[in-house]
Each structure stands twice: as C-alpha cells, then as structure tokens.
Amino acid sequence: QVQLVESGGGLVQAGGSLRLSCVASGSIFSINVMGWYRQAPGKQRELVATMASGGSANIADSVKGRFTISRDNAKNAVYLQMNSLLPEDTAVYYCSYRHYRVVWGQGTQVTVSS
C-alpha cells in the first residue's frame, strides 16, 4: 500500500509563488508516475502536471510557463513550483502516484487572492 503526504499549500496574492511537496511511502515501485491534480469548487478534478520516474513530464497548457514539476526518486518525492499564480489557480491540489492504479493524497488548499 502507498501513502502520500502533501505539504506547502496556503494563501497567496496574485502574482505570488508557492511550492508544493509530496512524499510517498509504503510499497513504492521504482517505475511510476507521480504528479499533481487540482479541483476547484464545482469543477471536476483536472491534471496540473505529472512526471514519470524516468523524467518525462506532462503539463497542462493552463500552467505551462508558470508551474514547474520536479521529483527526487531517492526520496520518493514530487514537487510543484508554482509561480505567477492567478486567482483561477485556486483549488485543492492533490498529489497522485500511479503504478497500474492511482493513489491520491489528502489534498492541500491553494488560495490565490486578487
């Protein structure tokens, strides 16, 4: 079983930055995909960015150029550096781990004020 612990959410003004962290523990397979999704009130959960253990990344067009995903395989960790935040980035951000099936973190709130 895999557990995910997220940290780094909070309240920030538009134009500001936040960095999210997620550490996985438990039965971790070396080949996996970790990343971030978000869900705003009244909307479906959507992809923000994911990165495979080999380094290939998938980033949503809405955050390209502003958000950067990275990971430390030795620590089973994935990070999301969020710059130039916009009010529309306000959401609960969920860490994900995928190896055949997806495991979700508990979510961390990101609120961007205008």
Image (tube, rainbow, N blue to C red):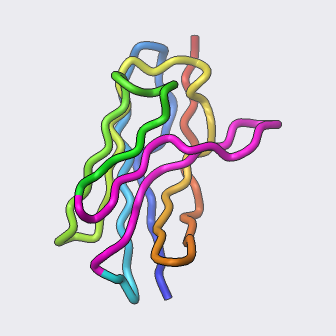
Residue 18, placed above or below residue 102: above
Towards the viewer: 80 or 33: 33
Q: Is residue 7 left or right of residue 73?
A: right
**Residue 91: percent from the left, percent from the top?**
62, 37
Q: Is residue 40 magenta?
A: yes
**Residue 45: percent from the left, percent from the top?**
68, 46
Residue 65, placed above or below residue 92: above
| Screen quadrant of the C terminus | top right
Q: Residue at x 45, y 59 (%)?
A: 6
Q: Is residue 102 magenta?
A: no
Residue 82 sits in quarter: top left
Q: Residue at x 55, y 72 (%)?
A: 103
**Residue 95: percent from the left, percent from the top?**
49, 57
| Extreme-left residue of the structure | 74
Instruction: Give the tally of numbered discs.
Output: 0
**Residue 69: percent from the left, percent from the top?**
32, 44
| Extreme-right residue of the structure | 42
Residue 87, placed above or below residue 56: above
Magenta residues (range): 30-54
Q: Residue at x 50, y 41 (%)?
A: 48
Q: Residue at x 56, y 44 (%)?
A: 47
Q: Is residue 111 left or right of residue 95?
A: right
Residue 87 sits in quarter: top right
